[in-house]
Structure formats: C-alpha cells, structure tokens
Amino acid sequence: MDSIVVTGMGWATALGSNMDRVWSRLLEGRSGIEELPSDLKLKNQKAAYIADPTPLSYKQKLLSLTDTALLNTLNDSNFQDGKFQRKYLVIGTSLGYRLDSIDHFDESLDQWLADVAIPPGFTPILLSTACSSGSDAILVGQELIRSGMADYCLCGGSDILGPSKRLAHTALGTMSATNLKAFDQGHDGTILGEGAGLVALEVEGRAGVTPLARLRGCGSANDAAGLTAPDENGEGIRLAIERSLSDAGMRVPDIDLISAHGSGTFTNDRVESEALTNVFAQTHPIVCATKGAFGHTLGATGALEAIALINSLHKGMVPPIANMTRPMDLPRLRLSLGDPINNTISVGLSLTIGFGGFNTSLIFSRF
Amino acid sequence: MAHSQLCIDEKYLVVRSDSFVSKYADLDPEFCIGLKSADPYVFPVFDSVTKIIKGYRHLFEDQTNRVGFIMVGESYPKKTTEKILETLNSSRRVSPIQFINANAGAAISYCCTKFLFRGPTLNISSSTESALAIADLVAGSWLDKKHAYGVFCINTAMDENGSCGAYSRFICENVSTEGL
C-alpha cells in the first residue's frame, strides 16, 4: 500500500497564524487565552479569540480563518495545481456560525465551504461530529487518498467563537471559573477558542517535496453514552485507539507521544486519563495537550492537535501543557510539564473526544 | 413501511428502510423513551434505524461494539437552531438542552446511545454526489478493515419547511440466516 504523507500544514490560532512563530510560542508554554469582555452573563469572560483587523460577521470570520489556513497549507506543501486532478477540501466544524446569526441559520450547512473550496478548484466536503470534526476530516482524507478517489486532500477543522457557545458552556457547567488547566490538580473546566487548521495529504513520492510526517492509521468509535456524557469506562476511547493501531499495523508500545484531548473539565480529564492509563499502562508515553494554549476550538481542535503532534515528530520537541503547574497524579503517563521535551519521537497519536460520543484517534509517524 | 433484506454479494448483506416520521408520538413506543427533547430531524433517522433493528434483531446480537453509523445529507436540527436564536435575541440566554440537541450529529448519538452501538461514526453535512460517494467509500473501508461488522448508512433530506426524511441501509457481513 502506498504511504500517505503530510506535505504541508497551516493554522489560524489565538497565538497567530505563522506556523513557526506559533510553534515557538507553544514551546514557551504561552497561552492565547485572554479576557474577551462581554455583556453576556458568563461564568468566565476569558476566551482564546482571534482579533479582527476589521469587523467581520460570524460567517465572514469562519471564511477568513479557513482561507488563512488553506493558503498557508498550499504554500507549505508547495502545491502545484497542474499536478493534481482530484482535489478535495474536507473540513469539520461543530456549529460554525449557525447558532449566532439569524441571517444564516437556514442556509445549507455546507454553503460556506463551497465558497472557500470551489474558486481554487477543490471539491468541498463538510463534516460535523462535534469536537472530533477536525480529526474526522483527516480520517476521511486518508480514505480518499488511500482509495485513489483523491490525489490531494486538504483536511482539518475550522470553528468560531460566538455568544451561543459561550452562553451554552456556561449553562452546561463545562466552562472554567479560572482558566483551562488540562490534567492539572486545579482544573475546573474549559475555555473556548476559535481557529482553523489544515493538513495536506497525498501519496508519498512527489518530486521536490519533503513530507513532514506519515499518516499511518485512523480509528473512530462512539461512546453510546449520551449527548454530552462520555462513557465512564472509557470504552469508546479504547476502541478508537485500538482501531487506529490496527489500521496502522502497530501495537501499543509503538506510541511514543499522545496529543490528548485535554479539555480541562473534571469529567474529560478523569475519563480520558483513566482510558489512556488503561491502554498505555506498560509503556509510559509522553502526553501533551494544546487547549491551554489555543482554548477549546471545538470543530477545529482535532486539526490543531494533529498539527502540534506532527510538529513534535518533525522537530523532535514536545511543548509543555500550557497552564498546568500541579499535574494530576498519573504515574503511568508522562505529562509534558515545564520546559519542552527535546527527544526524538517516532510515532504519535492524536485523540479527540466529542459531545455525542464521537471519539477519533489518528496515528502519525516521523518521516 | 417497506423494508427488505438483500444479499448484494457473498460478502455483504443489505437491509433497507425509510421514514418520514415528523413527530415524537409517531415513534415506536418500545424504543422512543429519551427522545422527547430531540430535534424533529432526529425522528426519521431514528425510526428508519429502529425498523431495521426490530425486523432483523438477529443481525445485531453480540455485535454492538462493531455497529457503525454514517449519516450523510442536508438535514440538521433546524427547529432547535431557530429556538436557540430566538432565545438568544430575546433573553440573551441559551438552553443547554437545546444546545446539545443542535449538534448536527445528534441523530447518530441518539441511535448509538439507545442501542449501545460503539462502532465508528461519521456525519457528513452535505448531499452532493461526492458526499454520497464518500459515505459509501468510508463504510466499505470500515467493513473491510473489520472496524465494523455492520454500518448504518443513512441518507437524509430536508425540504424548505424543515420536514425531514431518512433512507437507511444496514450493510453487514453476510451471516447465514438459515434456521432463524
């Protein structure tokens, strides 16, 4: 089977959109979470937002973030239009701008994506599996390339912050009263963010292109536990990881690094860390998480986590978990604390856990 | 309702069902508990899945961890979205129940939760030919890779008034039904 490689990446985050500069900030443990004053009755005014140079509607902002990630990814992958016949743009978003403006609520869900994809000649595919949307876009990209249905795929996620999401997470009790501190003893909830991230997938071998990583395997599983609650036994997480390992032809000891979901809520951190401990008890992988830096970007988070993981594989550095100062007692996992870890990482796994029970696991290896 | 069990080749068996149920009261009372707060777009999806499960229970025995779902089409929780926007504009609040039911993949979550299906799941919010082809591609791959023993492929449609329909196929490994 041909090897599927990542030949480019791009993101738009609360820490910026330049790949190297944002990566440096992640290694420094910096966070894009700041006060975003609002007259809404929120549990916390903080958010990882991306300031607009000019006022944009929610729809315009989603288009703008996606466009930024798309152009950066095309440049990074040395995209040559004439080389590819079947090009897809596969994007996941949780709710996009749909809950924030009466002007657009009855538009077809994929209309905005067609506006981004069709001008540069890509076939648009929109996914929505809550916080696993961005990861599932990469899973679909893998299937498209592997089958030969596509020869070049831009895959990832994009989502924006609006009043509905901030109010809803306040009402759901999932928003932190302090800050997002994934896997910290003082964790008390999540902080929302916005952003976009894309990876370029193609079959290995294009002349003049040095891939960043190989996409080895993908796996998905549902928790079957409800619309918000995860499976308390972490069964869905375990099944997603096992399916991705099987797809990659790998075993548990092959995984050196995990880019965790790490949303900072009591429930997520407990269930996720127990599930990871159960699967990786004998192998002690390094665990990192990006939400303390980028906020919880919902439909985009899977893509941002995957990009951070690929950077770790490519550059041999693992960023610390931002805002984590007193790690939870997890002796079987090596939480990335303090200075960045400088180490050769061969294989990494990126995990997302979404509302509605959508779990997705992606495995990448160093090129 | 017409449903049929078809053997498409020696490897896979397909069962089909469709539904245009638009009200909670029209759902099968044996299964509908827990769906009262669901958006109406969930009902035809749930109903078409329920008909297949009820008609072919033997196909699902001991397989719940390996039953997957792919939903593809233009349906989404339009009525719930409208309610959220009304409340947001009138009282600057959002109901958490409405918010979680506004998730475009909620219909899959209801089905998986009700029947304890833990197979792979995917929701494609598009009804283009490409989207339909990708749904079949991914379903076939999950079956070939043994990530799933069976996959519900559900095509949804919604008219301009928000009325929804669902056409479901359950594609699974071809098991012998002799003697059942």
Image: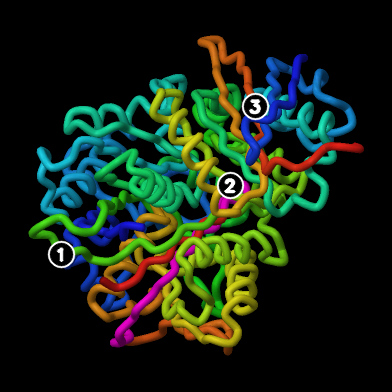
Q: Is residue A50 visible?
A: yes
The local secondary structure at tag 2 comes to: helix
| Residue found at the very far front of the displayed protein | B10
Q: Which residues are magenta?
A: A341-358
Residue matched to label 1 = A210
Figure colour scheme: rainbow
Q: A210 or A60: nearer the eye?
A: A210
Residue A222 within the segment the image draws in magenta? no
Q: Who is closer to the viewer here, B174 or B117?
A: B174
User: Helix or strand or loop: what does disc 1 sit on?
Assistant: loop
Type of residue at label 1?
Thr
Circle 2 residues within 10 Å: few <14, some 14–19, many ≥20: many
Q: Given the image, what chain letter belongs to the residue carrying mark 2?
A: B
In this view, the residue in front, A24 or B132, is B132
Residue type at tag 2 = Leu
Which chain contains the residue that carries disc 1? A
**Spatial distance from mark 3 to mark 1, Cα to Cα?**
43 Å
Q: Residue at x 18, y 40 (%)?
A: A84
Labels 2, 3: front one: 2
Residue A363's spot in the image, x, y percent?
42, 65
